[in-house]
Image: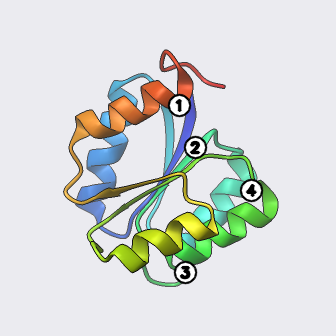
Amino acid sequence: MAKILVVDDSKLSRLMHVNTLRGLGHEVVDASNGEAAFELFQKCSPDLVVTDLLMPQMSGAELITRIREHNPEIPVVVISADVQQASKEHCRQIGANAFFNKPLRADDLVQYLDSLFCTGGAK
């Protein structure tokens, strides 16, 4: 299974994503802001990062940019309540692989993971 870093300043959203991913058998680490997430990213070397956009201390966009500087290949998924097309396009331009709107349907994330990891296994 994959090691996944989940980043969201909303404790409820973060726990929902963590529980969904753990229920699928993935190893999950989580952070409540981009700064803490980047530290975990460097320590844990996750297979996938799932992040919110609007967070204190370091936004999701800043986190994606820093991740891309260190590892341009790791998949990054954005899950955000920001529905503006410009935000989605900006995320794509800085290296996000996928963008989902909140509230996230668990099936959408599961389907994406299946396509990413073929059978749900780690890369």
The CA distance from mark 3 to mark 1 is 26 Å
Q: Which mark is residue 58?
A: 3
* 10 Å crowding of disc 2: few (<14), some (14-19), many (20+): many
Q: Which mark is residue 42?
A: 4
Which amino acid is tagged 4? Gln
Identify the residue under disc 2.
Answer: 48
The CA distance from mark 1 to mark 2 is 10 Å
The CA distance from mark 2 to mark 4 is 13 Å
Q: What is the x, y in percent for residue 35?
A: 60, 74
Identify the residue under disc 1.
Answer: 116
Residue 1 appears anywhere in the view? no
Mark 1 secondary-structure assignment: helix
Mark 4 secondary-structure assignment: helix
Outermost residue on the top side: it is: 119
Q: Is residue 19 above or below residue 96?
A: above
Q: Which colour scheme is used?
A: rainbow
Q: Earlier in the sequence, mark 1 or mark 2?
A: 2
Q: Which residue is drawn at 70% across and 70% down?
A: 66
Q: In this view, does 76 lie above or below 68?
A: above
Point out the image quarter for the N terminus. top right
* 10 Å crowding of disc 3: few (<14), some (14-19), many (20+): some
Q: Do the residues labelled 1 and 2 touch (CB within 8 Å)?
A: yes
Q: Residue at x 30, y 74 (%)?
A: 82
Point out the image quarter for the C terminus. top right
